[in-house]
Amino acid sequence: MRPVFIVAAPGSGGPQLRDALAASPELTLLDQPGHELLEAEPDLHPANRGWDSNRLAAGDSDAAMAGRLRAAFAGRPVVHSSHDTLRVPFLHAVFPEATFVFLHRDPAEAVPAALADWQAGRAVTYPDLPGWDGLPWSFVLTPGWRAFKGEPAEEVAAAQWEAATRIAVGELQRLPPERFAVVDHAALAGDPPAELGRLWEFLGVAPGQGAGFRPAPAGDPSPGLETALARTADTALVARGLFAAPPDDRPAEQPLRSVSTTSLAALLDELGASLLVSTYQTNKVVVARRAGRSVNTHFRAFDGPMGMAHRDGRLAIGTRAQVHEYRDVPAAVERLGGPVDHDACFIPRSTHHTGDVRIHDVAFAGDELWFVATRFSCLATLDHEHSFVPRWTPPFITELAAEDRCHLNGLCAIGDEVRYVTALGASDEPGGWRERRADGGVVMDVPSGQIVASGLSMPHSPRWHRDRLWILESGQGGLGTLDPATGEYEEVAQVPGFTRGLSFHGSLAFIGLSQIREATTFGGLPLTARLEERQCGVWVVDIDSGRTVALLRFEDLVQELFEVLLLPGVRFPEIAAPGDDAATGAFVLPD
């Protein structure tokens, strides 16, 4: 039994996509709606579950029930019900070979379409639903639905779209990537043959001859719609950022444009923090700071910035051929001026010229600054006499040479000790790591020199958090934990891009995503074939649930990031450039 479940919020065009996909001779339609087959099981009907919601969890089925359901969904049917946005874990548990297709439609179109279906009687309703007077509740019982009793229809429909989409997006992220595909309603309506062909290829079935897609009617905007849609903004951006290509309407005069969820601004405010993001591709360090309900992105120019580290007011930035060190000078804040109240100003203190050693990660071990000299396959520190001081090389590296033999890249310090590193291959040949870049990645324990994990896909950004070692498996777009004792990697979340750059705060992981990289798949689709689905920005993931809760997405010119650095306790910092008034007019003297 390999049913295909179309997961789409009300008004998103799920029935139309179901019928279009079923044109394949290898797919079928059920004789009875899928939600009716499920709810024919007494234990699954919402009336017997206190009318709480349509949500079903993985453990809501026993073996006997699962057998009956598999018989009812025999063959390869294409199934759609908006209820399924709340049932992905249940469906995956009962049908482990099932595939899912997430259909995203902008809420500005989906919510009016849902209202039109509602008013025309084309939606699922529960006529015996208690406690709902006047406007009937339809489509999907989302958690907390009773709170909207008496609200305008626009508010109810928008609340349904938001909850259904948020829950579906969170649950789909926890599936293996080969189990789900994604499609955008606008792309599907614009080029049905291409999008349907892509989905049939993903499903491994013969295409339907002459099949087309008729977009779901958009419905008429109503007076209260604009206010109602405000509740969908964050979820819409997360869903679109995860699953759909960005709109092609970006102003040409804003090549460094970014968009973010309001939840990111709220998180930065709650944490009292800001973000630094390095993008060597555009020679910028981005300072991301909360400004009202949005995030302000301020760009500072550097020559190929890569790794960054912060400790006790010290900031280090590794660039193409230099290491810059800064100090937070509170007195300099007064010289910044402007309408914004800064709370930190990092003043340049020293620049060390290393030469082009391809600096990657930078970290403080105690008071000492370490960095990865990737071109020389070593870890290094600085002194006043030399370009750099080699401090550690992997045991398999036989000589210090500017040949990037293993692409050593990631560095994890725990307290005063440099402890773990990542590399893309255990090679001693010039550029030898390139031969197995897809699965030759390793993690090494620095004190012992031992390889503690291998077979990884382009690992980066090892970090120690909550007494566990975390890494980014960049080639797979993954974040996970690694057990150094066993070498076992456990994925916690997958996001739509080449993952590189990682910071933590409590249960939140701030992950950098890049767009242009070799990769395998995302959402069941080859990333090299669907480049526009790969995003560039910072994704915030709840590591307890694996769900994306906020994001900052860069558009146009910014396509590759290296480091994401959270600055706890620093809400609105500035990085003063040499020659700025703050740098030249502030003086720090010994007591």
Image: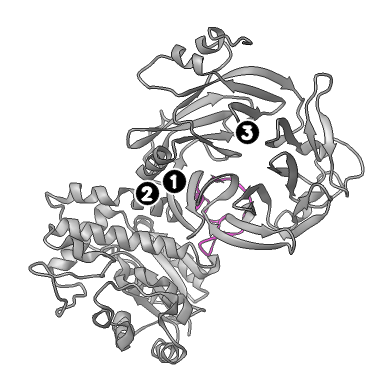
Q: Is mark 1 on a helix, strand or loop?
A: strand
The boundaries of the magenta stretch are 511-535
On the question of residue 218 being in view, the answer is no
Tag 1: amino acid: Leu
Q: Find out whether the residues at labels 1 and 2 contact each other: C-beta distance under 8 Å.
A: yes
Above or below, 96 against 371 in this view is: below
Rendered residue at 37%/45% (across/down): 263
x%, y% of residue 562? Answer: 61, 39
Q: How far apart are marks 3 and 2 (CA)?
A: 28 Å
The residue indicated by pointer 1 is 551
Tag 3: amino acid: Met
Q: Is mark 2 on a helix, strand or loop?
A: helix
Crowd class of label 1 (few under 14; some 14 to 19; many from 20; radius 10 Å): many
The residue indicated by pointer 3 is 308
Per the rendering, the mark at residue 237 is 2
Q: What element carries label 3?
A: strand
Rendered residue at 26%/50% (across/down): 231
